[in-house]
Image (cartoon, grey):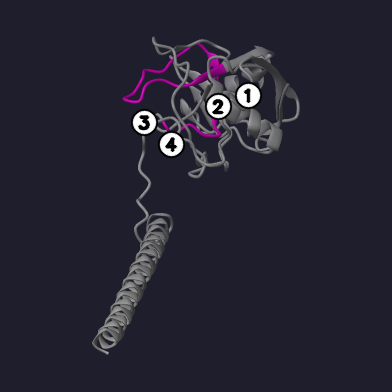
Amino acid sequence: MAPKKSSAREEREARERLRRYNARQAVHENQHKRRRRDNILAVIGVIAIAGVAASLQLFYFNGGPGTPSPTPSASPSSAVSADVPAADFAEPRLYEGTLVLNDDISLGVTLDARVAPQAVSSILADTLSGYYVGKSCHRLVNGASAGLLQCGAIDAEGTSDPSYTYGPIENAPEDGIYPAGTIAVARVADDANSNGHQFFIVFRDTTLPADSAGGYTVVGNISDNLDDLIAAISDLGTADGSADGPPLVPTTISSFSIQ
């Protein structure tokens, strides 16, 4: 009988060992599953937190309270306002056109996008949109060393459009001499990124010394009938008789077309 009792006891002990082994395995498996689940949840949590942080950062620096104040930049790309066309809007070639003042002064115009791509692109876009129609030529400079008519401001007072500015200065003469017939872009003194809608027509050889920003972007020239402008407007001088003021003959752009 003793061997039978020993065999029964060994079987019970074997079953107990198997039970404990299976129990440990079950605990180990549960721990493994729990760790894997916790790791997955941790990764998801990190991704979610990162997403929320990125969203908050975008809000903070793009329209939220942390938006940086706009500051002038020397970079041509950051100096261009949103409404200004890209410099490659105009093909790199010569453009011919017609500028009509006061309905009866028709001036032939040549613009060169090869040397002033940004400025010519701007003027071309303005002519296509009809911006210049009805705008005034508000300023006549008729001095001993300068003769020019400035046009294209948003009102008859010569106000610049603060929402439309671009740079850099292009094709400015190094000697500061602008021959009769030159068409150049007006800008604010000492600011290379303040070019806008306004341009000026030089009707007499003019010297314009460079300021701290440089000279003025030359976009082209009057190719025909400059004498008509001189006779009808420039020679009559300013409204107050000064060398720099509104022209005596109120002058408005009737049309400006470029081909």
Cα gap from disc 4 to disc 3, whole angstroms: 8 Å
Q: Is residue 149 visible?
A: no
The answer to whether the residue labelled 4 contacts the one labelled 2, judged by CB atoms less than 8 Å apart, is no
Q: Which residue is mark 3?
A: 74
Q: CA distance from mark 1 to mark 2?
A: 7 Å
Secondary structure category for the residue under label 3? loop
Q: Which residue is mark 2?
A: 87
Which residue matches tag 1? Answer: 90
Which residues are drawn in magenta? 193-219
Q: Are marks 4 and 3 in contact (CB under 8 Å)?
A: no
**Distance from label 4 to label 1 (Cα)?**
19 Å
Q: Quadrant of the C terminus?
A: top right
Name which residue type carries label 2.
Answer: Ala
Q: Nearer the viewer, residue 134 or 164?
A: 164
User: Which residue lies most toward the right here?
Assistant: 104
Which kind of residue does numbered mark 4 sit on?
Answer: Ser
Q: Residues within 10 Å of mark 4 (few under 14, many from 20)?
A: some
Task: Please state which amino acid type lies under the numbered disc 1.
Answer: Ala
Magenta segment's dominant SS is loop
The Cα atoms of the two marked residues, 1 and 3, are separated by 23 Å
- Quick check: marks 3 and 2 in contact, CB under 8 Å? no
Q: Amino acid at mark 3?
A: Ala
117 up-or-down from 81: above or below: above
State the residue at coordinates (44%, 34%): 194
Compared to 226, does 253 lie above or below? below
Distance from label 3 to label 2 (Cα)?
16 Å
The vertical placement of 35 against 259, above or below, is below
Residue 198 can be seen, yes or no: yes
